[in-house]
Image (spheres, coloured by chain):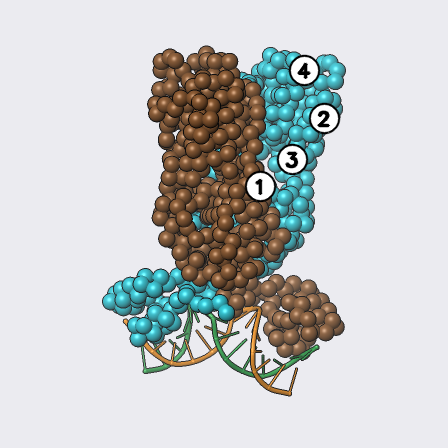
Chain colours: A cyan, B brown, C green, D orange
Amino acid sequence: MQQKHESTIVDIARALNLSIATVSRALNNHPKISEATKKKVKEQADAVEYRRNTLASGLRGSRSNNIGLIIPRVSMYFHATAITAIQNLLHRHGYNLIIGQSNDAPEMEKELASAMFSSRVAGLMVASTFYTTDYTHFDVFIRNDIPLVFFDRVPVDFYPAQVIRGDDYQGGFMATAHLAEAGCKTIAHLSGPLSCNLYKDRYAGYVAALRQYKLPFKKEWVFFNELTPANATRIAQQLFARRPYPQGVFASNDTSAITILEYARAQGIAVPEALRIVGYSNDPRTAIISPPITTVEQFPGRVGEEAVTALLALLKRGPRKREQILTPVITAVELVKRASA
Amino acid sequence: MQQKHESTIVDIARALNLSIATVSRALNNHPKISEATKKKVKEQADAVEYRRNTLASGLRGSRSNNIGLIIPRVSMYFHATAITAIQNLLHRHGYNLIIGQSNDAPEMEKELASAMFSSRVAGLMVASTFYTTDYTHFDVFIRNDIPLVFFDRVPVDFYPAQVIRGDDYQGGFMATAHLAEAGCKTIAHLSGPLSCNLYKDRYAGYVAALRQYKLPFKKEWVFFNELTPANATRIAQQLFARRPYPQGVFASNDTSAITILEYARAQGIAVPEALRIVGYSNDPRTAIISPPITTVEQFPGRVGEEAVTALLALLKRGPRKREQILTPVITAVELVKRASA
DNA sequence: CTGAAAGCGCTAACAA
DNA sequence: TTGTTAGCGCTTTCAG
């Protein structure tokens, strides 16, 4: 048998000859408990190293002090940085963070949503997969009035939950405009799948900038693939198979920007003289490669904090008051100019 | 009032005219429940979208299905990568992961440990701060027989918990030996604080390699500071203030190796011709900088998985059986040779 | 194979 | 200001 060392409020009630209710209240700083008893109770609690069993108090209130977070992968730069901010802020407000990784698989995301609900998280934050188009697995949170916030990777179509995202349209526009102003007459674009708001918006920004600068849009110079190094390499081969090369490349993430740069270097295409490159995310590697790559800073920490702030507001607001605050929050981005463009 | 939509086993019992006990057992695949009722129950459960309330079942069993993880910071390369592996593996075994960041502050670590205990985690994994020397805040886990596994950053002195760590001594040795074999006669070392097992062991490896290759050990060429870019820059200034420069530098993390490399480049010191550099961790940036940096791969994913494996074993083994498996697990490291050394 | 009932630790009416 | 009591939803003896 598992022997028990954990002490409960019952133990401390007995030791002090008080009712358990009084002890509970004292521990929770209830206003109408005398300072004297509060002091006594807290001392005894310290003495026996009492820790509130949050499973029990959560069960009572039918909600835990855990916040769920579902993201594609912890180790991606943007998300790792966002999580750091998210967890620190949540902790300051007394919440724990439960993390689940979808690995960009909608099925996994669904499973995790269910698990999060099972542990009765007080709220849920989601950066969804590239391929999530069906969001019904989150309905249960809506139905039960559990605050739900999407950030970064958000539903493309309407879904009745709070949304926090970077200004990807603006980012795409700035990146492309920067290339245009540097003199590029022909600009290729490596986009990800358009099922993802990120790529969709950056692409829209790209198109708008081309139009504004009266540059030609060519279907053969735009690519929609998952932005892996392998895909980027394949595209680079295609792009530089025969002249004229595009004078600029706007890659919708830094990994592919780096791949393009390395490919160009290997082919003896001078960057930025013969080819200008702009990436997206300000991944630490872009600052360190030669030449360093111009890219778009998204301030992942700030995005994370905005998401938490929104969640806390929902948490405070209580049930059935959500309608009013569904306006998406759009956080600013910034072009970081470096030598590559 | 918060209206309720969540259905419980009571609901499904009522709907099926069964006892709640039967429903509970059916849902848990209890052997002596007829297949017929199991089927009925599960169908009804699906129909009403039942999700087990793990707070309640946890309370009953006095333990949750959550595993706690305390680390210095999610966004550090090593830990981000380890977490990815950890969470994926835990999920496969039906556990959730609760993450807390100590920000390398022992006080915070203590607070988190307490919070983790409060939510009655089934087990706890810890990579402690650089400065933790007092581990008593983990005693409560030991006393209550909650599996506790330290990984990567582990107690320097004996503490009765399972330990998983990389072979830092070997890593330090290989790094230094590599410099020696490349012809460096004088090798400086940027270490972190020796209160941390990582730096202590790598430093010991450094010293051992010097001895083996009959190279001089000079106090002025060894530094013990937190390995931040600022500190590394300061040290670089000191190191290259006057000749003769050391011919090799072994930096105990990649961030400072990168800083040293950039400093050398700025000073016109040719790498590797005039100065050879080896880092530690195989941070993605080391592969991309020019010249790419030789470093020690720690296989963070593998370390994470070993830690989980150990934890799961403890979880299965049940109470009071821990003594036997306290032997530390030491995972292999590998020197990744690149152009810098 | 199924049911009745107790209780995990805590909070919140309701009383006093 | 404090005590009594009734559960929160689930698992698990103990009885059929």
Q: At which x and y percent is residue B211?
A: 43, 26
According to the image, label 3 marks what residue? A200
Where does the image place residue A65, in percent across and percent down from the top left? Answer: 47, 57
Q: Residues within 10 Å of mark 2 (few under 14, many from 20)?
A: few
Residue drawn at the location 50% of the way across and 25% of the way down? B177
Read off the chain for label 1. B
Q: Earlier in the sequence, mark 4 or mark 3?
A: 3
* Residue that appears at 69% across and 74% down: B32
Q: Which residue is mark 1?
A: B301
Distance in Å between CA atoms under marks 4 and 3? 31 Å
Q: Is residue B100 or residue A329 the one in the foreground?
A: B100
Question: Split into 4 quadrants, where in the image is the C terminus of chain A?
Answer: top right
Q: Which residue matches tag 4? A: A267
Q: Dot 1 lies on which element?
A: helix
Spatial distance from mark 4 to mark 2, Cα to Cα?
14 Å
Name the element at disc 4. Answer: helix
Is B34 positioned to the left or the right of A278 in the image? right
- The residue to which callout 2 is attached is A234
Chain for numbered disc 3: A
Please state which of residues A332 and A62 is positioned toward the viewer in this rendering: A62
Amino acid type indicated by mark 2: Arg
In this rendering, the answer to whether A187 lies above or below D2 is above
Tell me the tag on residue B252.
none
Q: Amino acid at mark 1?
A: Gly
Label 2 to label 3: alpha-carbon separation: 21 Å
**Which tag, 4 or 2, sits closer to the chain's start?**
2
Q: Are marks 4 and 3 in contact (CB under 8 Å)?
A: no
